[in-house]
Amino acid sequence: YNCKVMVLKAGNSSGYFNNSDIAEAIQYAYMNGASVINMSFGGSSISIAVEDALEDAYTSCILVAAAGNDGACNNPACMTCDIKSITYPAALPYVIGVMSTDANGQNVSSFSNYDHNPYNSIEYEVYAVGEGVGSTWPSDKYACLSGTSMAAPTVSGLAALLRSSYSDREVYSTKFIQSQIVN
């Protein structure tokens, strides 16, 4: 459907992500015409460099990020939740935060971070299947994996299809495409 994939690696071989590498990858994607940026990673804080890169990219890119796998609610003041954690960049207001469901899309995954208070300032917006998702694996193999990092690419794919249908960025803004996904 006229969609292409630009593969960028922001993490190092041990799986650690330096903020400078993340910011550089976001800037590279944005400057080289990406319509959607999938971020299947996250952490409890965000650097100014990453936030600045995301704000720049938001002018023309749909930003999608994994909500995290701690089984935590996103409300630090919650009195009823045992585990509380905010995952960035998924919690940023201009990023679509993706939570995980089981393979049938029926139940929230036990590991998935979730949005405890919809429509507050710390938001995860949508759910997608994140359990038992087929993925590539080293040495030319495949594996079934689970996590919000597996759910986020599904939403990114949907965003790419919507952008290909609504390709005029002057008429159909990033916010328009996001609203089609979230609603």
Image: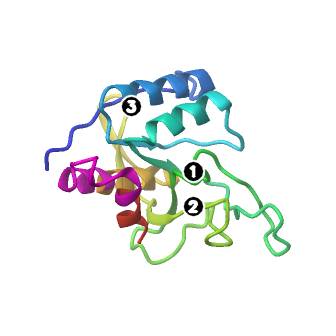
Please determine whether, in this image, residue 54 is positioned above or below residue 95.
Answer: above
Please determine whether, in this image, residue 64 is positioned above or below residue 114.
Answer: above
Find residue 67 and report its horizontal and vertical position in percent. Answer: 57, 54
Query: Which amino acid, mark 1?
Result: Ala
- Residue 112 among those drawn in magenta: no
What residue appears at the point 54 percent right and 71 percent down from the top-left corner?
108
**In contact (CB < 8 Å): disc 3 and disc 1:** no
Magenta segment, which residues? 159-176
Q: Secondary structure at mark 3?
A: helix
What residue appears at the point 71 percent right and 40 percent down from the top-left corner?
45
Q: For residue 61, say whether it is visible.
A: yes
Query: Which amino acid, mark 3?
Result: Tyr
Residue designated by label 2: 124
Find residue 39 and report its horizontal and vertical position in percent. Answer: 48, 42
Q: Secondary structure at mark 1?
A: loop
Find residue 96 and report its horizontal and vertical position in percent. Answer: 49, 55
Query: Which amino acid, mark 2?
Result: Tyr
Q: Which mark is residue 90?
A: 1
Say few, some or many: other residues with alpha carbon within 10 Å of mark 3 (under 14 / 14 to 19 / 20 or more): many
Say few, some or many: other residues with alpha carbon within 10 Å of mark 2 (under 14 / 14 to 19 / 20 or more): many
Q: For residue 11, say whether it is visible.
A: no
Q: Secondary structure at mark 2?
A: loop
What residue appears at the point 29 percent right and 55 percent down from the top-left corner?
172
Q: Nearer the viewer, residue 175 or 105?
A: 175
Q: Nearer the viewer, residue 72 or 63?
A: 63
Q: Which mark is residue 30?
A: 3
Cα–Cα span, label 1 and label 2: 6 Å
